[in-house]
Image: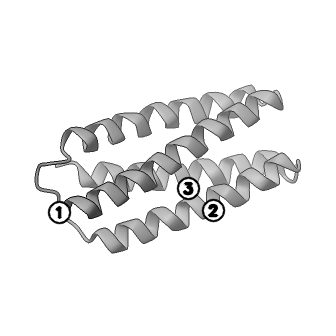
Amino acid sequence: MKPTEKNLLLDALSVSYNRTNYLKALCEEQALTEEAGQLDRRKARLKLEIDGLLHDLYDNWIGDAKTLNGQLDESNKAVDKAVKDIEQKVKTAENVVKAIGYIDDVIKIAAGLVL
């Protein structure tokens, strides 16, 4: 994988991290303390994975960057939709659960990049 491809993956993971952080704040604002706690744990796990990737940036990564980037983009779009629904208070608890699932997908992708 080329360094530019690695940087694109890190950018996509950073977007996921930022959205997770925003979603946690949104849950706190709506007094969804249990959901905010779940998101806080996901955020911490995602940060660990991102930190590991940053550490390994110049080591050899394996995998198909375009495929992984596409998967990250899809997860980020799904999180965006869940966030918009939560902002509009549409099926809030259900959408938080969906968003957590998408964040878990991102964590799996990130964990698979670190050898």
Disc sitting over residue 23 in the figure: none
Amino acid under label 2? Answer: Ala
Nearest to the observer: residue 17 or residue 8? 8
Quadrant of the snapshot with the N terminus: bottom left
The image quarter in which residue 40 lies: top right
Task: Return the x and y of residue 96 as percentages of the image width and height.
Answer: 70, 46
Disc sitting over residue 102 in the figure: 3
Disc sitting over residue 62 in the figure: 1
Residue located beneath label 2 in the image: 78
In terms of sequence position, does the residue under pointer 1 or pointer 2 come before the other? 1
Task: Return the x and y of residue 43 as percentages of the image width and height.
Answer: 50, 35
Question: Are circles 3 and 2 on residues that touch, CB within 8 Å?
Answer: yes
Q: Which residue is located at x 31 percent, y 36 percent? A: 51
Task: Return the x and y of residue 107 as percentages of the image width and height.
Answer: 42, 48
Question: Are circles 1 and 2 on residues that touch, CB within 8 Å?
Answer: no
Q: Which residue is located at x 26 percent, y 71 percent? A: 64
Viewed as shown, does residue 14 lie left or right of 94? left
Amino acid under label 1? Answer: Ile
